[in-house]
Amino acid sequence: VAVDAGDRRGARHVNDMAIHYLSPARIGPVRAVGTVLGERPDGVVTRVEIFDDGADARTVAFAIVTVGSR
């Protein structure tokens, strides 16, 4: 379940996700950043990038996620 603090519509659920692992996170902390790409009838399409901040913010994974209300 995903929640946006500024979104008054309530909790959202992942309808679809494709994740790509690039390399292991070895040092940490690990940080995720989401970017909205657009909207579809079944939800909001978001790109999520995961970084290993202790390893010069190396990208360790990314995902394309559709987040909807159902």
Image (cartoon, rainbow, N blue to C red):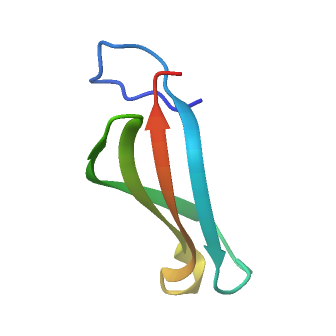
Between 39 and 63, the one nearer to me in the picture: 39
Residue 56 percent across, percent down from the top left: 49, 86
State the image coordinates of residue 51 (x, y, percent, origin top left): 53, 72
Image location (x, y in percent) of residue 35:
32, 56
- Report the side of 16 relative to 66 (left or right): right
Residue at 35%, 24% in the rendered image: 5
The residue at 69%/86% (across/down) is 23
Judge by depth and name the residue closer to the eye, 70 or 34: 70
- Residue 39 is left or right of residue 43, and the answer is left
Farthest front residue in view: 41
The reply, left or right, for residue 36 in relation to residue 15 is: left
Choose top left, top right, bottom left or bottom right for residue 21.
bottom right
User: Is 20 left, or right, of 34 in this rendering?
Assistant: right
Q: Is residue 45 above or below residue 11?
A: below
Q: Position of residue 61 (x, y in %)?
A: 59, 74
Q: Would you identify the image quadrant in which residue 15 lies?
A: top right
65 or 27: nearer the eye? 65
Q: Which quadrant does the N terminus fall into?
A: top right
The quarter of the displayed image where residue 27 is located: bottom right
Count of picture labels? 0
Up-down relation of residue 2 to residue 58 (above or below) = above
Give me the residue at 29% from left, 21% from top.
7
* The one of 46 and 51 positioned closer to us in this rendering: 46
Residue at (74% x, 82% y) in the render: 24
